[in-house]
Amino acid sequence: MKLFRIISVLLLALAVTSCYRGKPSEDPPIHPNPNMDDQPKYEAQERSEFFEDGATMRSPVPGTLARGDLREDSEFYQGRTSDGQLVRKMPVEINLELLKRGQQRYDIYCTPCHGGSGAGGGIVVKKGYLPPPSFHIDRLRQIEDGHIYEVITNGIRNMPAYNHQIPVNDRWAIVAYVRALQRSQNATLSDVPEELRNGIK
């Protein structure tokens, strides 16, 4: 029994000291399976001897889609109904969280041109960029939500497309915030809660 305890203590001491070297080792690391470090693979744009066209980077098989790219909901992903018409009202629930996200994304992507209020006087316009129309003109206040979404996605005239920078959910959040801006700049007394109307002249 005593011998067993001595051996156990020695093994424990050996295990502890083998994990601690006190300073970085100058010996190369041990690689029991070097294939995990140096795997045969093609780099991007590298020529391939395997494929007939010599290209390593392969195009998807015609008629196939990557997982998650089916996007059957045309109203949500394209801003259009199944028969191709622009959606009048956005297909997402409008709540405070969505509006705050829309404000944050608007401030990042839209304010430089459209300005904080949406009137079209952003910083790049002051530097000479062609001014966009104000969101507060009647035409844009009455336009479909799907049109605003489509413009964010594909761009229009001088405005670039943002489909690669802004995810679908965030595009709808921006649409919601643009609508809130339009309402804020064209509000009437009936839009104000009754308990607050007395303080307005």
Image (spheres, rainbow, N blue to C red):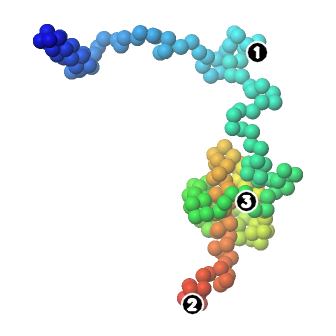
Residue at 65 percent across and 84 percent down: it is 189
Residue 36 in sight: yes
Residue type at tag 2: Asn
Q: Position of residue 5 (x, y in %)?
A: 15, 14
Residue at 79 percent across and 58 percent down: it is 87
Residue at the farthest left position: 2
Residue type at tag 3: Met
Q: Quadrant of the C terminus?
A: bottom right
Residue at 73 percent across and 13 percent down: it is 51
Look at mark 3 in the image and give the residue it sits on. 90
Closer-to-camera residue (109/146): 146
Q: Quadrant of the N terminus?
A: top left
Residue at 60 percent across and 59 percent down: it is 98
**Which quadrant of the structure image shows residue 42?**
top right
Mark 2 surroundings within 10 Å by alpha-carbon count, few (fewer than 14), some (14 through 19), many (20 or more): few
Q: Secondary structure at mark 2?
A: loop
Mark 1 surroundings within 10 Å by alpha-carbon count, few (fewer than 14), some (14 through 19), many (20 or more): few
Q: Secondary structure at mark 1?
A: loop
For marks 3 and 1, the one nearer the N-term is 1
Q: Are marks 3 and 1 in contact (CB under 8 Å)?
A: no
Disc number at residue 198? 2
Between the residue at mark 3 and the residue at mark 1, the CA separation in whole angstroms equals 45 Å
Image-based side of 16 in relation to 77, left or right: left
Closer-to-camera residue (59/138): 59
Q: Position of residue 58 (x, y in %)?
A: 71, 22
Image-based side of 81 in relation to 136, left or right: right
Disc number at residue 53? 1
Q: Position of residue 149 (x, y in %)?
A: 73, 55
